[in-house]
């Protein structure tokens, strides 16, 4: 378990719902990954890379809603600039995306 944090630390994390609009291969990544283009509604469109190739085919990800952290600083990954971080659960090194049970508006905060 990680160290205990206070509520202010947690509330600084901006988790939002977004819809994956585009999925591309990312052959330059160190580990197998996709490049994702995600629509966060009023927050705009952000891109990221995700190591989710073992459990998800590109066509299965299109138009899927996901949970992501949208207030991390941009991060260079190979020749790609990541602007958010998708959230998932890890089981035996495979990442399973977290997503809402029902369709919600893009940009909806996760509390």
Image: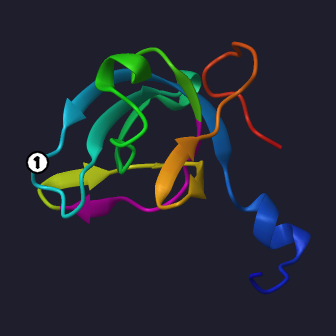
Q: In this figure, which residue is indicated by the disc labeled 1?
A: 27
What residue is rendered at 33% in x and 41% in y? 53
Q: Residue furthest right?
A: 7
Compared with 101, 36 (above or below) is below
13 lies left or right of 1 = left
Along the line of sight, the residue nearer the viewer: 82 or 30: 30
Residue 80 or 24: which is nearer the viewer? 24
Q: Is residue 55 left or right of residue 90?
A: left
Where in the figure is residue 80, as x and y percent of width and height?
Answer: 19, 51
Magenta span: 67-77
Measuring from the top left, give residue 11's x and y in whole percent: 80, 59
Residue drawn at (58%, 48%), measured in percent from left and top? 87
Q: Quadrant of the N terminus?
A: bottom right
The image position of residue 111, as x and y in percent, is 83, 43
**Local crowd size for mark 1, using a 10 Å CA cut-off: few (<14), some (14–19), many (≥20):** few
At 28% from the left and 40% from the top, the residue drawn is 34
């Amino acid at each position: 378990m990680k160290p205990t944090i206070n509520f202010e630390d947690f509330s600084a994390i901006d988790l939002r719902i977004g819809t994956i609009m585009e999925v591309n291969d990312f052959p330059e990544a160190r580990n197998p990954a996709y490049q994702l283009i995600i629509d966060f509604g009023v927050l705009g469109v952000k891109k990221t890379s995700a190591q989710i190739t073992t459990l998800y085919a590109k066509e299965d990800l299109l138009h899927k809603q996901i949970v992501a952290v949208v207030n991390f600083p941009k991060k260079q990954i190979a020749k790609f600039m990541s602007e958010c971080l998708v959230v998932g659960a890890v089981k035996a090194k495979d990442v399973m995306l977290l997503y809402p049970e029902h369709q919600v508006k893009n940009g909806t905060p996760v509390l």
